[in-house]
Image (cartoon, helix red, strand yellow):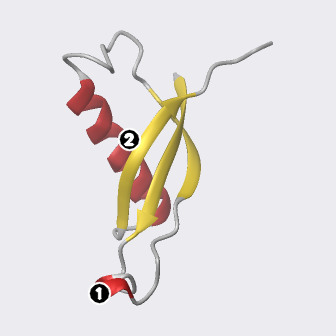
């Protein structure tokens, strides 16, 4: 399992027409991405897995804006 920090915004309609600025949020998720070329040919698959994990944790209005792999520095 690999830990990821997922960046996202909530798209609930409140940012429509600039009424309220979108605020970026972060969550950490663990996904089985070992063996995937997450920055190459498997990038879309990895993104889809991160998006599903974010939707499961936060809800349906999540728009993933980016992700970073978390590396242990122990």
Label 2 neighbour load within 10 Å: few <14, some 14-19, many 20+:
many
In the image shown, does 7 or 36 lie closer to the viewer?
7
Seen in the picture, residue 46 relative to 55 is either above or below; the reply is: above
- Name the spot of residue 41 as percent of width and height, x first: 19, 17
Q: Residue at x 31, y 30 (%)?
A: 46
Q: How many marks?
A: 2
Seen in the picture, residue 38 relative to 15 is either above or below; the reply is: above
Label 1 neighbour load within 10 Å: few <14, some 14-19, many 20+:
few
Per the image, the residue denoted by label 1 is 17
Image quadrant where one finds the C terminus: top right
Q: Earlier in the sequence, mark 1 or mark 2?
A: 1
Q: Quadrant of residue 48?
A: top left
- Give the foreground label among 1 and 2: 1
Seen in the picture, residue 35 relative to 61 is either above or below; the reply is: above
Q: Secondary structure at mark 1?
A: helix
In the image shown, does 49 or 18 lie closer to the viewer?
18
Q: Residue at x 30, y 37 (%)?
A: 47
Disc 1 from disc 2: Cα separation: 28 Å
Q: Mark 1–mark 2 contact, CB under 8 Å? A: no
Q: Quadrant of residue 14?
A: bottom left
Q: Which mark is residue 50?
A: 2
- Name the spot of residue 38 as percent of width and height, x first: 33, 20
Q: Residue at x 32, y 15 (%)?
A: 36
Q: Residue at x 30, y 13 (%)?
A: 37
Q: Secondary structure at mark 2?
A: helix
Residue lying farthest to the bottom in this orientation: 19
């Amino acid at each position: 399992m690999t830990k990821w920090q997922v960046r996202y915004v909530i798209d609930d309609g409140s940012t429509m027409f600039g009424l309220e600025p979108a605020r970026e949020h972060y969550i950490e998720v663990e996904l089985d991405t070992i063996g995937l070329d997450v920055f190459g040919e498997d990038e879309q698959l990895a993104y889809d897995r991160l998006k599903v994990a974010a939707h499961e944790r936060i809800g349906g209005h999540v728009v993933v804006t980016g992700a970073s792999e978390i590396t242990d520095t122990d």
